[in-house]
Image: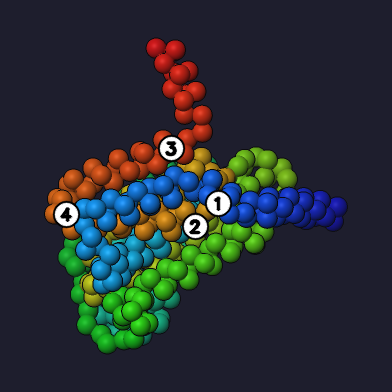
Amino acid sequence: MRSEDSLLISNEGAIAAESAGTVRSNGSLLHALRTYRVTISLFIAMLILTAILAPEFFNLQNVINVMRQASIVGMVAIGMTFVILTGGIDLSVGAILAVVGVAFALMLKLGFLVPVAIIISLLIGIVIGIINGIGATFFGIQPFIMTLATMAVGNGVALLLSNGTPQDFSINSGIIELLGNGGVGIIPGPVILFLISAAIAWMVLRYVPFGRFVYGVGGSLETAHLSGVRTTRVLLTVYAISGLCAAAGGLMTTARLYVGHPTAGSSIMLDSIAAVVIGGTSLMGGRGGIGGTIAGALLLAMVANLLNLMGVSPFNQQIAKGLIIVAAVLFTTAGLKQRIKQQWTGL
């Protein structure tokens, strides 16, 4: 038994050491530019286009509003990044956001202390995430199907708890103000929380062995398992992180509006996946990171804000968002020309 444990520890150490060397070698500016070239190119193109079409975008107050809009999507996208890096997907984040928002509002209306309500709300997100992880690991349900089912159940629970109506509340609290409409100086509270969470996630993925195991599982689940990585533990943890981030997004949304809405997360799932994909994280797993996700969330917020300033209808905004996602995926696909040529010859 000891020899087996020693082998596992040795193997984990070997993976950690090898991954650490890879991370260090990949830490150069040149590598970062190559990795996120599509995201950076889209970002620069958006800045140029914005300067031409809507110069008022660069007004300080408008820039702050863009950052505020990006913070909620970005928060949810942080958790989504962990899941997608393992080769999975989490379609339940919108439902988690809605359930947590409604539950948080109801708890405050029932007289719960704000810190207690926040802790319970975050635990709800973690528990739902763990349920997703159990279904995907112990029962072998495809993550797409498992989280799709959780999404359906979660949406139903949010409507059931709220009787299908928004649950408003009125309470004076510095914590709620910071989560929603408050801030430190000119920087909104949600932006601060998002950037702190992103910094922690970035450090975990870059410097902590767990982060290297996430990449290992995404690269090859079987290889990681044979090398001694506790793959089930890794997968359970990433889905719990996704649930936690979605719950945090629900708290931020509810605190901003002072309303727990049962359909508040209707678009957050698409937006969070889009932010991750535009940021260069591969849907196949094993490649990407938090830096790209931050840029992706900001890019989506910039596009939405620019289209609003130009008076474009919300319907056309959805079309633009879809085209951006397709463009990002195409530009990040390796060997695209060869693939097209091969498929063309097969017609």
Dividing the picture into quarters, in which one does residue 65 lie?
bottom left
Nearer-N-terminus badge (4/2) = 2
In the rendered structure, the answer to whether residue 100 lies left or right of residue 139 reads left
Does dot 4 land on a helix, a strand or a loop? loop
The amino acid type found where label 3 is placed reads Phe
Q: CA distance from mark 1 to mark 2?
A: 9 Å
281, above or below 199, in the image: above
Q: CA distance from mark 4 to mark 3?
A: 27 Å
Q: CA distance from mark 4 to mark 1?
A: 33 Å
Q: CA distance from mark 3 to mark 2?
A: 18 Å
Dividing the picture into quarters, in which one does residue 54 lie?
bottom left
In the rendered structure, the answer to whether residue 340 lies left or right of residue 229 reads left
The amino acid type found where label 1 is placed reads Ala
**Which residue is the site of mark 1?**
32
User: Within 10 Å of the Cα at label 4, are there few (<14), some (14-19), or many (20+) other Cα atoms?
Assistant: few
Asked whether the residues under the numbered discs 1 and 2 touch, taking CB atoms below 8 Å apart as contact, a structural biologist would say yes
Q: In front here: 148 or 51?
A: 51
